[in-house]
Amino acid sequence: MQTQKLDVHEHQSNDAALAETALSNLRQLSMKLAMAEIDISVFDSMQPLEDDWRALERDNLQSLHQSYDWCAAWVGAFQRPLAILKGTHAGETAFILPVEIVKSRGLSVAKFIAADHSNINTGLFSENFAGSGGSIDADQFAGQLQNALKGRADLLLLQNIPLEWRGRQTPLTGLPMVQNQNHAYQLPLLSTFEETLKQLNAKSRRKKFRVQSRRLEAAGGFEYAVPETSEEQHDLLDTFFRLKSARFASLGLPDVFADKETKTFLHGLIDSRDEAKEYFGLQMHALRLKGENDGRIAAISGISRKGDHIICQFGAIDEELVPDTSPGEFLYWQTISALHGKGVALFDFGLGDQTYKRSWAPVETAHHDVVLPITPFGVAAGAAHRLVTRGKAHIKARPKLYKFAQGIRAKIG
């Protein structure tokens, strides 16, 4: 009798596996058929898409950087031509890829809006399209995108896309890609700050925090500040620009925040918020000193929020103040501990491999770039992008070589 029961269970298991395989094949066939019926339109302004755009961005897994308000702030500041791709199937919006045209040396590149200041990009997809993962016909999809952008761009370059983000595979899987040289680093926020710290070297980190606290108190004390008024928030952003400019100058590097358009964009994000949707474009946090240096800012950072995902966009310190306290890292402690109990599940330190990020973030996420040529000129530019990206990745994977490259960069400015 036991043998018969085992046989029955084996048959049931086989039947379930066959059913799952058949269902998977059906989904893939359905998606491939649907791709043939998707119509891709190109828009040169955001306004006609606003309702559909905001409906898609409600999905918690769609990146903040593709949200309507984030993109609107950038477009208003930079005024670059747009080529926003909208896919429609059976009368419903399947996806929106917010793309602008960036021109350089005769080359027209279609890139995500605000790509130069984005830490993670996903695009915007309907629930059905987002769930398709790698089951779409990638060659057909690529051809449709190329046809839509003919006469507008030489190359479609969609950067900093995780192939899988919080359990969901990107529908862009299968398009021509290269792994980006930069990874991103995240810290999951658990039920309490103590639980969160257990993911790290909690004992060592608490000891360091106590040392930092004592040194700050000895210097006159401190205040963790998150101003509520718009005016104070804008003032802190200007302080960040000043501190970061001094830092870049000391390293002999160009200031990526120096141009008027970037400053206008970031100031615009400060007033972009919707508490009901748990969204804010940019919120400034600061470590303000007391005592002898009363009112001076030792460390500052700007964070963004969409749903349960916080992204740290940037940070800076005043290197003349309390350097032995590591004020930037101390500010992260204050910020991360304060976010507990506020519906945040993930604190994202963003792109770039830095020691403090690795010390805080147990999760490392690789990003990829879609590199899809539209014209022969784009074929050459795409090949160059792949070559340069792989070269940078090779250098960054070798600490001594990376340090040498940074030294050369600093010398040539």
Image (tube, helix red, strand yellow):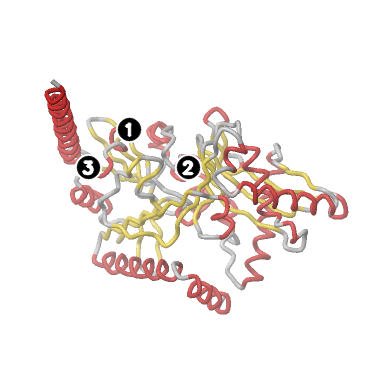
Question: Mark 1: few, some, or many residues within 10 Å (few <14, many ≥20)?
Answer: few
Question: Mark 2: few, some, or many residues within 10 Å (few <14, many ≥20)?
Answer: many
Is 193 positioned to the left or the right of 79 in the image? right
Q: What is the three-letter code of the residue carrying label 3?
A: Ser
Q: Which residue is mark 2?
A: 64
For the residues bearing labels 3 and 1, Cβ distance under 8 angstroms: no
Disc on res. 161: none
- Number of marks drawn: 3
Return the x and y of residue 47 as percentages of the image width and height: 42, 38
Q: Quadrant of residue 49?
A: top left
Q: What is the three-letter code of the residue carrying label 1?
A: Glu
Taking the view exactly as shown, the residue that stands out farthest to the right is 292
Q: Is residue 26 above or below residue 160?
A: above
**Residue for point 65% across, 38% down:** 338
Query: Rounded to the nearest whole Å, what is the CA distance between mark 3 and mark 2?
Result: 25 Å
Is 412 positioned to the left or the right of 322 in the image? left
Disc on res. 127: 1
Return the x and y of residue 386 as percentages of the image width and height: 33, 66
**Residue for point 36% across, 55% down:** 368
Question: Mark 3: few, some, or many residues within 10 Å (few <14, many ≥20)?
Answer: many
Disc on res. 135: 3
Q: Is residue 197 above or below residue 249?
A: above
Query: Rounded to the nearest whole Å, what is the CA distance between mark 1 and mark 2?
Result: 17 Å
Query: Rounded to the nearest whole Å, what is the CA distance between mark 3 and mark 1?
Result: 14 Å
Label 3 element class: helix
